[in-house]
């Protein structure tokens, strides 16, 4: 990434403040209980897997080739978390209750994964990247039936998160403070 | 052997290179060679330069650096003047490329070999790994990630022992 932008990698990692990050809010949220962590990871792994699948037919050859390496491996991440969601959803009353509570929070948050990013329009039109709509359809076709077999209800009613990726929760600044603290103590240090 | 001095052009036959590479073992699984694992994709010789193309197995596998260095060293020992080991990502490595002999070696080593999948990786998720020591399929997967990226952790109910399976990819 730093080769493409010309930025110093250490600066990107250790000096960027929250406002310079582009990510969905779902990944900023605190880890919660095990069900929450697994549910968040599951929904994200499902997206990574369908996206890698779509990228295999990208017209940008280097991307298609890398995707053909990544896609089979994503299957293992998906297997790991989907196994956990099944165990938790079909486990005890307690594990089902916690999994449902996690899904109730994360389902509207996951909507933000499919918010259109206008800066990618050119790449999408060139068939270098899949559209948000394609990804959303692939993702729903995968996760909805699966969650139902795991004994969970797809939440309805809560408004989806539609913010663009430069809007963050206060959690991101806290996370970055933790992650960047040591480097910032002495910026000139050689590690 | 004192061959390989810069003043003499020393061309090595590709067959000799392949033979030497049979001696380069997977650092994590020292009973199988990088050739048997399907890691070495191509060998070519041009004048005094030997070129080897390798493909990484699992992304981020830390053994790749060691494999590259070991390949270079083994070819230099043959007397080659120049060795170039190139990593190619495409086509991506498939566990179907692991030879039959290597599968036997893996099993003898105590590592359940990966099921073949013919390009449809999803079907392997219905595969039940057999415990290499009792061959019973009365096993259950405990974790899709093990001590290395390439291994999953299983448990044999018959023997009440955990074991690892080399993952299909």
Image (cartoon, rainbow, N blue to C red):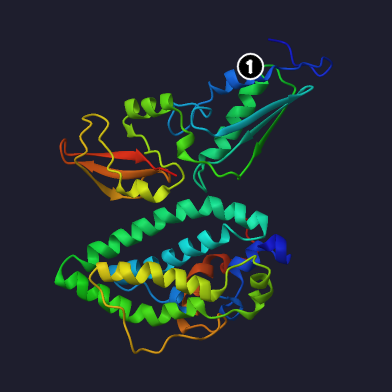
Instruction: Give percent across and percent down for residue B97.
Output: 49, 34
Chain of the residue on which disc 1 is drawn: B
Query: Which residue corresponds to the image point at 59% horizontal and 81% vertical from the top-left?
Result: A19
Tell me if residue B74 comes above or below residue A145 in the rendering: above
Tell me if residue A191 comes above or below residue A182 in the rendering: above
Residue A24 can be seen, yes or no: no
User: In the figure, is residue A164 to the left or right of A95?
Assistant: right
Instruction: Give percent across and percent down for residue B139.
Output: 22, 42
User: In the figure, is residue B54 to the left or right of A7?
Assistant: left
Tell me if residue B144 comes above or below residue A132 in the rendering: above
Query: Which residue corresponds to the image point at 63% horizontal and 57% vertical from the top-left?
Result: A63
Residue A9 can be seen, yes or no: yes
Instruction: Give percent across and percent down for residue B108.
Output: 33, 25
Tell me if residue B3 comes above or below residue A96 in the rendering: above
Query: Which residue corresponds to the image point at 20% horizontal and 66% vertical from the top-left?
Result: A90
Q: Quadrant of the C terminus of chain B?
A: top left
Marks counted in the figure total: 1
**Secondary structure found at label 1:** helix
């Amino acid at each position: 990434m730093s080769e493409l932008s010309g930025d110093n990698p250490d600066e990107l990692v250790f000096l960027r403040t929250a406002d310079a990050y582009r990510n969905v809010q779902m990944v900023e949220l605190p880890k919660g209980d095990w069900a929450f962590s697994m549910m968040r990871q599951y929904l994200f792994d499902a997206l990574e897997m369908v996206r890698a699948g779509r990228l295999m037919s990208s017209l940008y050859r280097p991307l298609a080739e890398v995707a053909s390496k990544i896609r089979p491996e994503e299957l293992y991440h998906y297997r790991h978390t989907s196994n956990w969601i099944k165990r938790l959803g079909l486990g005890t009353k307690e594990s089902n209750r916690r999994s449902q509570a996690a899904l109730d929070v994360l389902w509207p948050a996951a909507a933000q994964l499919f918010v259109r990013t206008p800066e990618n329009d050119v790449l999408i039109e060139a068939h270098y990247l899949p559209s948000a709509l394609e990804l959303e359809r692939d993702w729903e076709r995968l996760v909805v039936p699966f969650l139902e077999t795991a004994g969970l209800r797809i939440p309805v009613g809560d408004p989806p998160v539609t913010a663009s990726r430069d809007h963050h929760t206060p959690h991101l600044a806290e996370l970055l403070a933790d992650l960047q603290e040591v480097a910032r103590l002495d910026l000139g240090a050689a590690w | 052997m004192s061959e390989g001095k810069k003043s003499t052009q020393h061309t090595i036959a590709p067959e000799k290179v392949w033979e030497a590479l049979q001696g380069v073992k997977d650092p994590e699984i020292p009973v199988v060679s990088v050739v048997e694992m399907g890691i070495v994709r191509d060998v070519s010789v041009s004048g005094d330069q030997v070129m080897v193309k390798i493909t990484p197995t699992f992304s981020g596998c830390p053994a790749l650096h060691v494999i590259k260095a070991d390949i270079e060293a083994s070819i230099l020992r043959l007397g080659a003047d120049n060795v170039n080991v190139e990593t190619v990502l495409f086509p991506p490595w498939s566990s179907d490329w692991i030879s039959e002999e290597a599968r036997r070696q893996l099993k003898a080593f105590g590592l359940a070999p990966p099921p073949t999948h013919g390009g449809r990786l999803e079907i392997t998720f219905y595969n039940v790994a057999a415990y290499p020591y009792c061959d019973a399929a009365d096993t259950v997967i405990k974790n899709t990630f093990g001590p290395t990226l390439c291994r999953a952790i299983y448990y044999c109910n018959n023997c009440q022992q955990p074991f690892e399976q080399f993952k299909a990819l």
